[in-house]
Amino acid sequence: MNAPSSLAAPLSRNAFEARLRRIGEERYHDLHPFHRRLHGGDCTPDEVRAWVINRWQYQSRIPMKDAAFLSRVVDADLRRRWRSRIEDHDGGVEEGGGIRRWLALARAVGLDPAYVESGVGVLPATRFAVDAYVRFVRDMPLLDAVAASLTEMFAPKIHAERIEGLLKHYDFADDTSLSYFRNRLAEAPKDVAFGLNWVLDHADTLEKQDAAAAALTFKTDVLWAQLDALWHAYVEGHVPPGAWQPGEGVLA
């Protein structure tokens, strides 16, 4: 008879880390056909614009989910270590930050940044997936919330592939338009190092390890669902009512 998870011994630190990394190897959205299409130069200009518009919904909510997380953290040291994530994405009062860089990408692909920033035209499934992630971080135990952020472990690979693929295949790609991805190559590793160690330190029972693995799996589902929605709407042509239609929000 197997012992209940609450009584079974937890995995070793190395084995637990390997379990988390396998989730990314099997489920991270770099495996999605939309990203292969994008990085291989097969997306139409409107498919690229649809991706930029819908990914904005996720990018713009990252500092909001981190603020929700911080509002629940009693440990001042954890708050100090975590708050740089908000600064990385929001930037300063007048310059910098990932969301400004994403709007520079929007302009480069021919979209009005004000239209993108408004959120008008975001796919319903994208909105639901991103909102679910913000609620998860706001409401679930801190361990689960930190574990969900660990998709960043797998992000440098996709950013490097994206930079290479976009520069090779698309005229809009240059240092300015791709600055979001270049900056994340430097920013994400420090976040990963802290977040991963925090999860490995605090998931000290098998039950907590299971919860952390489930949280990371949930986050991969959030990312995958957004690309499923893009594919269905803009590759297969099933655009739902109210979502972006090609030609809307395009710079004159």
Image (tube, rainbow, N blue to C red):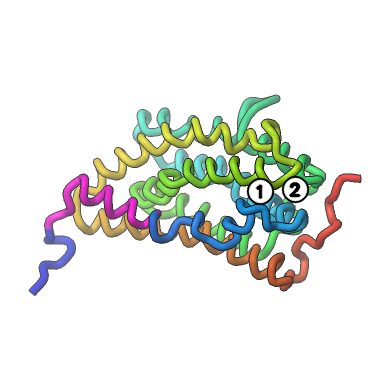
Q: Position of residue 196 (x, y in %)?
A: 33, 41
The answer to whether one can see residue 215 in this image is no
Mark found first going from the N terminus, 1 or 2: 1
**Contact, CB < 8 Å: mark 1 with mark 2?**
yes
Q: Amino acid at mark 2?
A: Val
The answer to whether one can see residue 65 in this image is yes
* Start-end of magenta stretch: 9-24
SS at mark 2 in the image: helix
Decide: is 7 above or below 175. Answer: below
Give residue 126's quadrant in the image: bottom right
List the single residue furthest toward the right: 252
Q: Position of residue 65 (x, y in %)?
A: 52, 46
Q: Residue at x 41, y 44 (%)?
A: 153
Please identify the quadrant where the N terminus is shown.
Answer: bottom left
Q: Nearer the viewer, residue 249 or 4?
A: 249
Give residue 64's quadrant in the image: top right
List the single residue furthest toward the front: 168
Q: Amino acid at mark 1?
A: Trp
Does 144 appear in magenta? no
Residue on which the image places disc 1: 56
Decide: is 64 above or below 129. Answer: above
Residue on which the image places disc 2: 116
SS at mark 1 in the image: helix
Q: Position of residue 93 (x, y in %)?
A: 67, 26
